[in-house]
Image (cartoon, coloured by chain):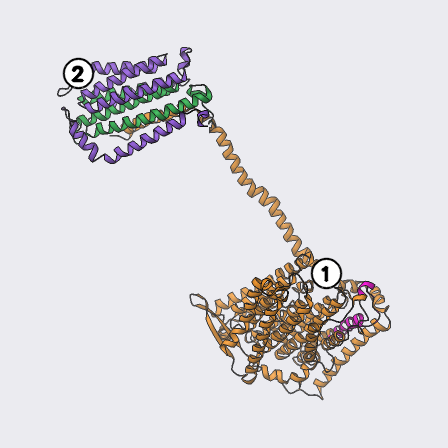
Chain colours: A orange, B green, C purple
């Protein structure tokens, strides 16, 4: 078992090194061979580990590989820790990672950086596996930074495009802010319990002071905010759509952005001891959920809509964790990984068919031409919107219901409104893309075709869990298999049995009704009377503009952070560097120049003058030695 | 005053005469000649010391021999440089060579 | 006047001779006169060596200085065809400082010599060993510097040839 767990992250690392260095020479145009092979094997191994945990859910697997850092009494090891939470993550990361690899074979074909792309994907898989398998915070942080690096490399994959390289930098820099919090949290942990091992930290959680614990939790959550694109650090994720679509599906929907959720869930024993921290997590999550959903309403870029829906979904997950519905949050993570990965891959298929066009206003009527893409994307959208009986319905409903039962009624309201808005924009996405008549240029229309098998098969494979997963693991609600499976991790769960007839069923009906209402509204606006959206935006211009411009968050950062930093740097350059530093250096040089000019006449170039100086010196020396120093 | 003092005073005077020549004359060849006077003065001092101070007997003459040898080498090189300079500049004036001034 | 191996009359004559010739070297207008004066000065120094019982050094002085170096200097004078000129051109501008300086040095050093007492007794007898003793010293204790100095001479010779050759002779 130890060898298998060790191999899971090691295989993609091997694939990365070989593909990056020898990929082009060894495999030529088939640079994907090794990368895809190692990820497939890693998937098989992950499934084996998952099965093992499935059958022995009570005892977590622990692997100690070697001591990594030793400093005084602090010892950090390189080791892995596999419990049921890790197993769920292995399932999501392994499966979606593998499918995205296969999908990329078709999507990236003919790109000049083909081998580079697969090398980066492999590196990402290594970092992500390290992140979820780690048995201590520092190793987790290594994976955390690794996925951040891969995110940067892959967003800026088409680095010749200025907007892509800008987006890569933005993602990297914004993530740094969160990482800073994560680092501080680790320092605080070292200070208070002198260990970073999960088991060690959680065993000593009682000995940490209340204020310190709150600080640790909030700083950890700050890391999660950056990585999982929560308000106010969400700005990087929509821009990250500059990267190739498989990357958006893998990193920015299904795996990496979930790392923040996973980290908070992993720190469960810390968070349940700090009610204030939980409240912050929930509030930020709830706010982000509705905020991002409102933005998604008016975006025209198909990938951006899905990106904002991802931000919104991640907000849902944090809302769940904060409200104490931990298992529901992970349930949603699992379901979301599948249906959001599916949505992105399907949108990639659409973009592929539209010769790279991403603007939904120029699409339409693709239902007939891309049947497979249509049906799979519809599945994803319905799951995302949360319509019975697809996976998103069960997961979302557990979260909203959980908030209600926990007494956070305002969170329940936010959840319901978000669900309504989500239904509208997912409906808008589907209706604009697949219904009506095609609005693209004739040239583009001519080229529309269904994607190759290597792309559509992963779509189908993802559509199946997106559709039925909820019924398999989530029934009955609040007590389904996933809850029992995660019990060893979230050990304090006290759930009362779900009542179909009663508050549980009623809440479910309400949310379903609201969602259906949203879909109907979208149907009215985008199919029956198409002039309605324009009229609406005219009647409420301020609301439309605010949503369309993402509530001016980027502008706010521009004014509050970026401008001052640039101005400050400019000031440092023009005043401090040029005047003070250069000035002092040049001033010193000027001083020496003056001094040298002063004494330069001494060097006459005539040897006899020098000899005269020597002889005078000798004379002085004789006098000094005889009458001043001598006896 | 013992015997050695007379020789040392002679050496001092000869040395100063040579030094004046080095410092004051313009002609490069004459400067070389004055240098030889100074070396001779030193040799006289060396031989005189070893002749009258117990314990160093014989070392003075040996040193003087070495000085004479080195002086011969020095004169050869010095005059060769003077001649090379003279070819290039048609001048033997020591103070006309001041290209290396600051 | 000290006794022992000191010959006051001979020393006085030779010393006066050396100093007069030395002054002649640095003051003669004609450089050829200076050179001749220098040869006589060297002869006087050789005589002083004899007075000091160092006959070997005296003979080497005759051979090297009077014989070789003087001739080299005369050759150099001939090769450079020194031009005649006004007397004041023979001294440079710093000579008005150089003269008092050298006089001061002479006076001060002489004063020191006259006023000093030696830390150990000074012999009145001549202590310089005979030729055999010098030879033993030169070829035993100082044989390595002796060989080394021959190398220096060789290097000087080659250097002088390289320096003094005409440029056009190099082709």
Q: Is residue C139 above or below residue A372?
A: above
User: Which quarter of the picture shows residue A481?
Assistant: bottom right
**Residue C14 on image: x %, y %:** 22, 15
Contact? badges 1 and 2 (CB < 8 Å): no
Q: Residue at x 34, y 28 (%)?
A: C157
Q: Nearer the viewer, residue A219 or A24?
A: A24
Pinpoint the chain carrying mark 1: A
Horizontal side of A489 relative to A66 (left or right) equals right
How would you classify the magenta stretch by its main secondary structure?
A: helix
Q: Which residues fall within the magenta stretch?
A: A419-444
Q: Classify 10 Å Cα crowding around label 1: few (below 14), some (14-19), many (20 and above).
A: few
Q: Is residue A88 visible?
A: yes
The label on residue C8 is 2
Single out the mark in the foreground, 1 or 2: 2
Let me know if residue A433 is in the magenta part: yes
Q: Is residue B15 visible?
A: no
Pinpoint the chain carrying mark 2: C
Q: Residue at x 56, y 77 (%)?
A: A45
User: Which quarter of the picture shows residue C76?
Assistant: top left
**Residue A156 on image: x %, y %:** 65, 60
Horizontal side of A497 relative to C37 (left or right) equals right
Let me know if residue A529 is in the magenta part: no
Check disc 1 and report its element: helix, strand or loop: helix
Check disc 2 and report its element: helix, strand or loop: helix
**Residue A19 on image: x %, y %:** 58, 65
Most extreme residue toward the top is C86
The label on residue A552 is 1
Q: Nearer the viewer, residue A106 or B14?
A: A106
Q: Nearer the viewer, residue C61 or A76?
A: C61
């Amino acid at each position: 078992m130890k060898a298998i767990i060790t191999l899971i992250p090691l295989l993609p690392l091997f694939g990365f090194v070989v593909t990056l260095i020898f990929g082009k020479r060894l495999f030529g145009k088939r640079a994907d061979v090794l990368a895809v092979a190692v990820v497939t094997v890693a998937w098989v191994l992950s499934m084996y580990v998952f099965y093992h945990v499935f059958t022995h859910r009570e005892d977590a697997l622990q692997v100690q590989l070697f001591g990594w850092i030793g400093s005084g009494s602090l010892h950090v090891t390189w080791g892995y820790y596999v419990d049921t939470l890790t197993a769920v993550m292995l399932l999501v990361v392994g499966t979606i990672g593998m499918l995205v690899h296969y999908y990329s074979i078709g999507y990236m074909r003919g790109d000049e950086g083909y081998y580079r792309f697969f090398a980066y994907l492999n590196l990402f898989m290594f970092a992500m596996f390290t992140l979820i398998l780690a048995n201590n915070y520092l190793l987790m942080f290594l994976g955390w930074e690794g996925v951040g690096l891969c995110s940067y490399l892959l967003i800026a994959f088409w680095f010749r495009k200025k907007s892509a390289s800008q987006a890569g930098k933005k993602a990297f820099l914004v993530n740094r802010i969160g990482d800073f919090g994560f680092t501080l949290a680790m320092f605080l942990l070292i200070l208070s319990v002198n260990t970073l091992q999960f088991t060690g930290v959680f065993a000593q959680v009682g000995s940490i002071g209340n204020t310190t614990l709150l600080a640790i939790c909030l700083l950890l959550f700050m890391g999660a905010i950056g990585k999982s694109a929560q308000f106010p650090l969400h700005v990087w994720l929509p821009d990250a759509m500059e990267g190739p679509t498989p990357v958006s599906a893998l990193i920015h929907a299904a795996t990496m952005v979930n790392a923040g959720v996973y980290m908070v869930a992993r720190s469960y024993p810390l968070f349940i001891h700090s009610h204030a921290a939980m409240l912050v997590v929930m509030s930020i999550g709830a706010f982000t959920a509705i905020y991002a959903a409102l933005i998604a309403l008016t975006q025209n870029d198909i990938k951006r809509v899905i990106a904002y829906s991802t931000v919104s979904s991640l907000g849902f997950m944090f809302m769940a964790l904060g409200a104490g519905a931990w298992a529901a949050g992970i349930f949603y993570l699992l379901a979301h990984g599948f249906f959001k990965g599916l949505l992105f891959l399907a949108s990639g298929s659409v973009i592929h068919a539209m010769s790279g066009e991403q603007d939904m206003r120029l699409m339409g009527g693709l239902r007939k031409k891309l049947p497979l893409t249509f049906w799979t994307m519809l599945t994803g959208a319905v799951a995302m919107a949360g319509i019975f009986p697809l996976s998103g319905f069960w997961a979302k409903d557990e979260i909203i219901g959980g908030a209600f039962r926990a007494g956070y009624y305002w969170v329940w309201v936010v959840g319901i409104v978000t669900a309504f808005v989500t239904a509208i924009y997912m409906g808008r996405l589907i209706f604009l893309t697949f219904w009506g008549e095609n609005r693209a240029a004739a040239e583009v229309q001519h080229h529309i075709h269904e994607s190759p098998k290597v792309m559509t098969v992963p779509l189908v494979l993802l559509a199946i869990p997106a559709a039925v997963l909820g019924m398999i693991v989530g029934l009955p609600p609040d007590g389904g298999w996933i809850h029992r499976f995660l019990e060893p991790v979230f050990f304090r769960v006290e759930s009362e049995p779900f009542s179909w007839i009663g508050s549980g069923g009623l809440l479910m009906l309400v949310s379903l009704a609201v969602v259906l209402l949203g879909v109907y509204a979208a149907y009215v606006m985008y199919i029956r009377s198409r002039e309605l959206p324009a009229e609406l935006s005219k009647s409420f211009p301020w609301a439309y503009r605010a949503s369309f411009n993402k509530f001016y968050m980027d502008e706010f950062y521009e004014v509050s952070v970026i401008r001052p930093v640039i101005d400050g740097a400019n000031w440092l350059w023009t005043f401090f560097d040029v005047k003070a530093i250069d000035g002092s250096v040049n001033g010193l040089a000027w001083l020496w120049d003056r001094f040298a000019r002063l004494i330069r006449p001494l060097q006459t170039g005539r040897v006899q003058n020098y000899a005269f100086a020597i002889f005078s010196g000798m004379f002085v020396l004789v006098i000094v030695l005889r009458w001043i120093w001598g006896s | 005053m013992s015997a050695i003092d007379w020789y040392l005073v002679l050496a001092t005077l000869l040395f100063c005469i040579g030094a004046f020549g080095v410092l004051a004359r313009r002609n490069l060849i004459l400067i070389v000649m004055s240098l030889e006077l100074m070396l001779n003065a030193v040799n006289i001092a060396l031989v005189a010391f070893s002749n009258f101070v117990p314990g160093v007997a014989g070392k003075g003459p040996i040193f003087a021999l070495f000085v004479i040898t080195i002086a011969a080498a020095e004169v050869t090189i010095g005059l060769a440089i003077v001649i090379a300079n003279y070819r290039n500049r048609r001048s033997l004036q020591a103070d006309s060579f001041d290209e290396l001034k600051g | 006047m000290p006794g022992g191996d000191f010959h006051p009359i001979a020393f006085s004559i030779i010393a006066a001779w050396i100093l007069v010739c030395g002054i002649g070297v640095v003051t003669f207008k004609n450089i050829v006169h200076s050179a001749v004066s220098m040869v006589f000065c060297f002869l006087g120094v050789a005589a002083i060596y004899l007075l000091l019982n160092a006959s070997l050094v005296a003979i080497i002085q005759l051979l090297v200085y009077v014989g070789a170096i003087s001739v080299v200097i005369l050759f150099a004078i001939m090769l450079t065809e020194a031009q005649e000129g006004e007397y004041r051109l023979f001294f440079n501008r710093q000579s008005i400082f150089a003269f008092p300086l050298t006089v001061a040095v002479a006076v001060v050093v002489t004063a020191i010599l006259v006023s000093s007492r030696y830390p150990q007794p000074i012999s009145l007898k001549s202590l310089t060993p005979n030729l055999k003793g010098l030879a033993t010293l030169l070829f035993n204790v100082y044989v390595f510097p002796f060989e080394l100095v021959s190398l220096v001479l060789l290097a000087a010779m080659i250097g002088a040839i390289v320096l003094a050759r005409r440029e056009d002779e190099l082709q």
